Image: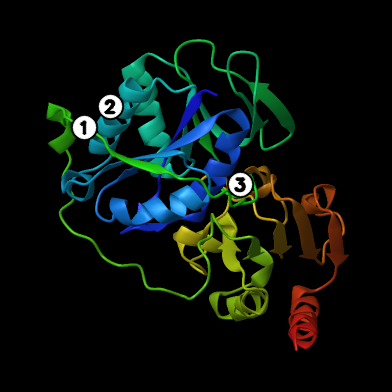
Amino acid sequence: MAEVLVFVDHVDGAVRKPTLELLTLARRIGDPVAVALGNGAAVTTAQLAAHGATRILTHEAPEYADYLVVPKVDALQAAVEAVSPAAVLVPSSAEGKEIAARLALRIGSGVITDAVDLEAGDGAPVATQSAFAASYTTKSTVSTGTPVITVKPNSAAVEAEPVWGEVEPLAVSFSELATGTKVTSRTPRESTGRPDLTEAAIVVSGGRGVNGAENFSVIEALADSLGAAVGASRAAVDAGWYPHSNQVGQTGKSVSPQLYIANGISGAIQHRAGMQTSKTIVAVNKDAEAPIFDLVDYGVVGDLFDVVPQLTEEVKTRKG
């Protein structure tokens, strides 16, 4: 079978879930070849092999941490030239999409972003995307060069597939542009103990109907009972009730969890663009005519301050 490059998103050797999902999808269209870069790359190999990576290309260098994006593009270009893959898969984060676009330009290929599914096609992989705020589903292929495809988190279930996973060093020569943008400082994000918003299997969001920063404790309590991430609409963020880093929508983050619970959110197109690909959508809103109800799988017409605490208690009771 043809080989498929998978860019490994990891933190000091801890592989993030979207990469494991990419390995599952890569096996549908070829033999996955993982590309692990930076500090801790060698530590990733056992986990990558356990999820189907037949080969693992590694390269550690300080440039990956000290400079932005371009060193990783240089490395992926070297991997493409060494492997001649059928496709290159990259997690669909903000950084991942920039890497993918730069790589496609380098190798004279096309790029598909925010795919939600992949399947083998006649000569090139077929990517499924949600377009126009998920009002339409499209299927696309790249007709020129090696396809570069970014895939949204939670697009596939992680499936273990242990293989030998041969580890090989990747020869990388950094370009002059690699050191053009230097990282001068880092501030660790304060941990809430909740899962990352874009990777969470369950997201509980609040909107204008929460009516104040102090009332987001109701949303957080439900999220914590479910082991979920907390999201917010643009209206809630603009009002200063919740951080922008938690905004779901066209100008925030795009999520695709198994379960999305929208509380006090009207369902404007800006918000729908960021969550409409969720597998199951539940809404709580006291306005029976709210647009969000046109989208949901389950809707509750009621005051969120009555409904959400009862739901939280029911979840806690059932979990014992």
Residue 102 percent location from the top left of the image = 34, 27
Give me the disc on residue 171.
Answer: 1
Q: Position of residue 162 (x, y in %)?
A: 54, 50
Image location of residue 318, percent across then percent down? 80, 83
Identify which residue, 174 or 222, lies in the foreground. Answer: 174
- Residue 117 lies in quadrant: top right
- Image disc number at residue 213: none
Q: Are marks 2 and 1 in contact (CB under 8 Å)?
A: yes
Which callout, 3 or 1, points at the residue further toward the start of the chain? Answer: 1
The disc placed on residue 274 is 3
Q: Which of marks 1 and 2 precedes in the sequence?
A: 2
In contact (CB < 8 Å): disc 3 and disc 2: no
Whether residue 308 is visible, yes or no, is: yes
Q: Reply above or below: 96 against 300.
A: above
Residue 122 left/right relative to 44: right
Q: Amino acid at mark 1?
A: Ala
Tell which of 92 and 205 is nearer to you: 92
Q: Using a 10 Å C-alpha cutoff, classify the residue at mark 1 as few (fewer than 14 neighbours), some (14 to 19) or many (20 or more).
A: few
Residue 253 visible here: no
Residue linked to disc 2: 78
Residue at the spot x=17%, y=44% of the render? 63
> In front: 259, or 172?
172
Nearer the observer: mark 2 or 1; the answer is 1
Please tell me whether mark 3 or mark 1 is closer to you in this view: 1
Graded by Cα atoms within 10 Å as few (under 14), some (14 to 19) or many (20 or more), the crowding at tag 2 reads: some
Q: Secondary structure under badge 1?
A: loop
User: In 3D space, how far apart are the residues under numbered discs 3 and 2 (Cα atoms)?
Assistant: 34 Å
Amino acid type at image mark 2? Ala
